[in-house]
Each structure stands twice: as structure tokens, then as C-alpha cells.
Image (spheres, grey):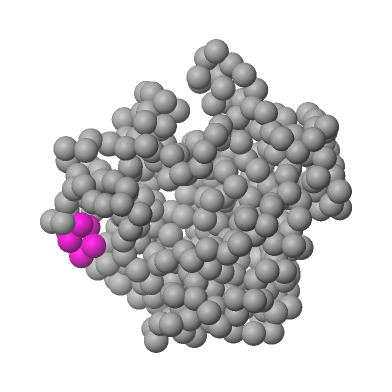
Amino acid sequence: MPLPSPSPAAASPPRLWRPQRVLVTRAARGFAHGRAIAERAAALGAEVVELAGDRLVAPKHDDPRAAYRAAKGTLAVVVAPPSKRRLQPIPPSADWRFDLAEGCHAHCQYCYLAGSLSGPPITRVYANVDEILAVLPAHLGSGGVTSVSSERAHEGTTFEGSCYADPLGIEHLTGSLSEAVRFFGRWDAPVQLRFTSKFGDVSPLIGLPHGRRVRVRMSVNAQGLIRFEGGTSPLQARLDGLARLARDGYRVGLTVAPIQPFADWPAGYDDLFARIAAALAGIPDLDLTAELITHRFTPGSKTVLRDWYPGSDLDLDEAARTRKLTKFSSTKYVYPAETMRTLRASLTEMLGRHLPMARVLYWT
């Protein structure tokens, strides 16, 4: 039986994102879910603009920084077309990827969405959630990750819900993640919903009938690197949220990313794992996984990130990296092999010492 969560009165209330503008397309207004999102945003004081059609037009600014800020402050309620509802494989995380939203309002200086998503960084949320979820059952028992892995087969068919967005960070506006949790909770089959977040307000998920078919991972990093993650929850708030979810019976996980060899990184990561162990201590039936992801970037993402964060001291020096080709023949820069071996050996040892119950899913 899940343990009661600590009283929220013991901590300061989380700071929830309030978009400056909410654009609602004509098609999105045809869905009750889309109208509800607009109503929630209006209740928070956001300006809600009902568009005459379905085309999004970004605000025009002569100053690129002003254009970036305007886009980051905009939420668009749209309808996911059939092409967006077609599932894609997403190794090594899960069998399949589906999207409840696209884009993120946070300001992470190493954001992997930079260069991956075209157009201004507006956060788009989908009004037709029921249509999105209805596609999933056709993929039961298929996939190239957990469905064919002897080590992860017990997870069932896995569906990643946070590839191009952080659905928890906007859940107070959308309610879409709760709908997905309920969907998997009702789905009496060997399946698992997976998503990761940098936000600690887990209140909307507490008490939902998840059926232990949901794994929530918190994206964490050494405290010295959290400064690169503007607009997200503090590290301790994320750990407290993860513990609260685990007490509520959810399967939980750690997405340690992006791992970087900063000054005195061994002490920084050792402290991280010690803090996680303290937050999760004493929770019964704890099902904990870890995914370890090193920092990498592409020429395209570097250009975008330098435009977005011109004063950043994030290390994006190609000369200190190894150039690799992706399966799509594009270029990415990763740490040299010796650095990767050192990082992997050290972090794996720390994780095993502080969190011996954690199951490492992959290193990349």
C-alpha cells in the first residue's frame, strides 16, 4: 500500500509556469480538452488568443533575443495531425515514442531540442489527446527495445512520452499527462508509460490509478551544473517529488544528464547520488532505474544555443570532442573515448555504492 506523502505545507509552493500568451487554433477549440487548456491558462492570467485558423504565426521582432523570449513565453494549443500521431522507435529509452506536446518553456543552455525542432521555440500542446492515446494499443508486443530484450522484457511494451517535451512541467495547464496515466492504469496488459522531467510539482499525479504501469524519471545532474537549467525546479525539489511519487506506488527512475567532466566533477556527482539516496531512503517496494547520458551536441544545435544564450560558458568546443556520425549521417560531438571510460567507471561505482538497488538501463 502506498505510503502517505509528506504534507505539502512543509515546503514552499512550487512556482508554476504561466505563459504570457496562449494561442488556440480553430481546430483545437473543437476538442473539449483544448478548450479546458485555454480555460486553465486564462484562470492563471495568461492572455488567450483565439486564432481564426490553424496556422501559427510567431511574433515578429527585430531583436533575436526578444523573438526568443516571446516564443518561450507562448503556449499554442493545436491538434496533432495523423503524421504526429504515428509512433516512432526511440532507442535506447523505449520501444515507441508518442507526443503529448512539443517544445519546452525552460531555458536549459544545453537543450537537445535546439536544432531538432524547426521554427521558434513555442511550446505546442495537443488538444486531441484521446486520438493520440488511441493509437498505442496497435503497438502492443512490438518494438525494438524492451519488447525484444531479455534484460528488460519484464517492462513490457514501453512508450516514451517525453521525447520532445517535458509534460510534467505543463501539466497544471494541460492535464494531458494525467489522462495518459489513467489510460495506462486501465490498460490491463504488459505495458509501461515512461517520461522524464526537470520539474518537482508532482501533485497532479498523486492518487491517480496508475496500476504500477508508469515509470516517472527525474532528470538530475550534479549541483554545479543545475545553473545551466534556467526555469526548472531546484534539484532538491525534483528529488522530493520523485520520493513522493515512489511513496504513491509509481515506478521511478533517474535520468542523469547531461553528464559533464566539470571542475571537481567526482565530488559533485558523489554528492548527487548521496542526496538521491537520502531522499529515497526507507521507501518500501522501491523500483528504481538509472539512465546515464553524457553531453553531446551537433553543429546545428551549437549555432542555435549560441544565439539563444550568447553569454553562456557551457563547453561547446569541438576541438576537445570526438566527431561521430549518427545513423542518419549527421555530425555530433561527444567526449573522447578515454574521458567516456573514466566518467562511466566513476559514475557507475558511485551509483552502485549509494544506490545499490538502482538498475542501470544504459549508458550513452
Instruction: Please state the horizontal and vertical placement of residue 185, each as a whole percent of the image.
Output: 70, 76
| Above-or-below relation of 129 to 280 | above
344 magenta-colored: yes
- The answer to if 253 sits in the magenta stretch is no
**Depth check, front residue: 220 or 272:** 220
Secondary structure of the magenta portion, mostly? helix
Is 128 rendered above or below residue 251?
above
**Residue 232 screen position, x and y as percent:** 53, 42
Position of 107 with respect to 315 (left or right) is right
Say which residue appears at 71% left-offset and 35% top-offset: 55
| Image x and y of residue 113, in percent | 47, 44
Q: Is residue 212 visible?
A: yes
- Report the residue at 42% width, 66% height from top: 91
Q: Is residue 91 left or right of residue 122?
A: left
Say left or right for 73 vs 34.
Answer: left
Question: Which residue appears farthest toward the left when viewing the image?
Answer: 338
Q: Position of residue 38 (x, y in %)?
A: 81, 41
Of 265 and 219, the residue lying toward us: 219
Tell me the residue at 69%/52% (across/down): 80
Q: Is residue 179 left or right of residue 162?
A: right
Instruction: Judge by depth and name the residue closer to the eye, 124 or 230.
Output: 124
Residue drawn at 44 percent across, 75 percent down:
144
**Quadrant in the picture for the C terminus:** bottom left
Magenta region? 340-345
Tell me the quadrant of the picture where the N terminus can be found.
Answer: bottom right
- Asked whether residue 259 is in view, the answer is no
